[in-house]
Image (cartoon, rainbow, N blue to C red):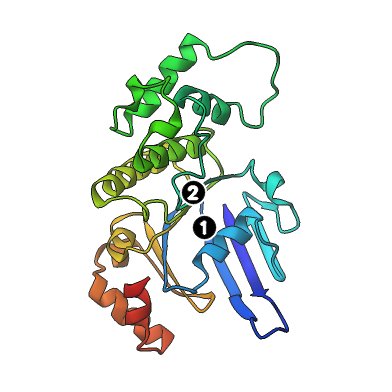
């Protein structure tokens, strides 16, 4: 469903601020894979999501989504393949519009629009059922302006909107990092339920190693712009934070791994 082949990305090349963000990055996801991605600050995690979504062009290499080479496609043309939730809860919703209006926008994305007015009663019932999954009581607040919701409620709504049309690829960029622990746990539980229910191919960046171990069927670790660990199956189920750090130190050949990961 996703294939990155020999991807390189350097920012500010030829200057004193030159930074190699991705170095010969190779990654392949099968349909339905739920991959958690960890790594220290500057490891290339967010850059990887940005080159997949088309926010940044690659220097060299290829990106394929669902068998389609999207390497040269601009961001807006890749949008039909991708759902994305950012770290900032304010980014994925329209604050001045109601909950039901935000969901209607997401459900009509990419479709032809006529002069038919408003949201139907059957759509409202559908939205209520969707919102129940979140466990936040939003199904009873369809006409509430989104700007009045808490950050956690908005982030949960953004998740629902991003997955409403079952994208080929779901990108989650530290989508619980700005939330309090209790709300983050609720959003992660909703994420797990939606991803498993709809069999969505998902890349989830997280700064929390325990979350990376607990969620998904596969764990990938980036270091200096390349994949240094790729763990799945029974090996992932047996992982602890301690032996994950130990493996990282071994494959990266660097004792700074502990600090980079724990501080990120």
**Real-space Cα separation, disc 2 to disc 1, in angstroms:** 8 Å
Q: Secondary structure at mark 1?
A: strand
**Up-down: is 83 above or below 69?**
above
Q: Are marks 2 and 1 in contact (CB under 8 Å)?
A: yes
Q: Residue at x 35, y 23 (%)?
A: 139
Could you say which quadrant of the image residue 62 lies in?
A: bottom right
- Residue visible at 43% across and 22% down? 127
Query: Is 72 positioned to the left or the right of 42 in the image?
Result: right
Badge 2: how crowded within 10 Å, few (<14), some, or many (20+)? many
Residue 126 percent coordinates (x, y)? 43, 19
**Sequence-wise first label, 2 or 1:** 1
x, y (%) of residue 55? 65, 56
The front one of 194 and 154 is 154
Q: Is residue 209 left or right of residue 158?
A: left
The kind of secondary structure element at disc 2 is loop
Mark 1, other Cα within 10 Å: few <14 / some 14–19 / many ≥20:
some
Residue 39 screen position, x and y as percent = 42, 71
Residue receiving disc 2: 201
Q: Please tell me which residue is depicted at 60% across the width and 26% down the height of the picture.
A: 108
Placement of the C terminus among the 4 image quadrants = bottom left
Residue behind mark 1: 29
Q: Which mark is residue 66?
A: none
The residue furthest right is 72
Q: Nearer the viewer, residue 21 or 2?
A: 21
């Amino acid at each position: 469903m996703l294939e990155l082949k020999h991807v390189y990305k350097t920012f500010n090349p030829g200057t004193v601020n030159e930074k190699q963000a991705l170095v010969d990055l190779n990654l392949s996801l099968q349909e339905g894979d739920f991959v958690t991605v960890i790594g220290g600050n500057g490891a290339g995690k967010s850059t990887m999501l940005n080159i997949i979504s088309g926010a940044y062009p690659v220097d060299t290499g290829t990106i394929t989504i669902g068998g389609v080479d999207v390497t040269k496609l601009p961001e807006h043309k890749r949008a039909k393949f991708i759902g994305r939730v950012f770290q900032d809860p304010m980014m994925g919703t329209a604050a001045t519009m109601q909950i039901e209006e935000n969901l209607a926008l997401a459900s009509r994305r990419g479709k032809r629009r006529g002069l038919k007015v408003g949201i139907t009663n059957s759509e409202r019932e559908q939205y209520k059922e969707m919102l129940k999954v979140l466990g936040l009581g939003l199904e009873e607040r369809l006409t509430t302006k989104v700007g009045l919701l808490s950050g956690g409620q908005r982030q949960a709504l953004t998740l629902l909107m991003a997955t409403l049309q079952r994208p080929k690829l779901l990108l989650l960029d530290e989508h619980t990092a700005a939330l309090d622990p209790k709300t983050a746990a609720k959003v992660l539980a909703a994420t797990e339920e939606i991803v498993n229910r709809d069999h969505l191919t998902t890349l989830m960046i997280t700064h929390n190693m325990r979350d990376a171990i607990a969620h998904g069927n596969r764990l990938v670790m980036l270091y200096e712009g390349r994949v240094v660990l790729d763990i799945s199956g029974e090996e992932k189920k047996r992982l602890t934070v301690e032996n994950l750090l130990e493996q990282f130190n071994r494959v990266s050949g660097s004792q700074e791994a502990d600090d980079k990961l724990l501080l990120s």
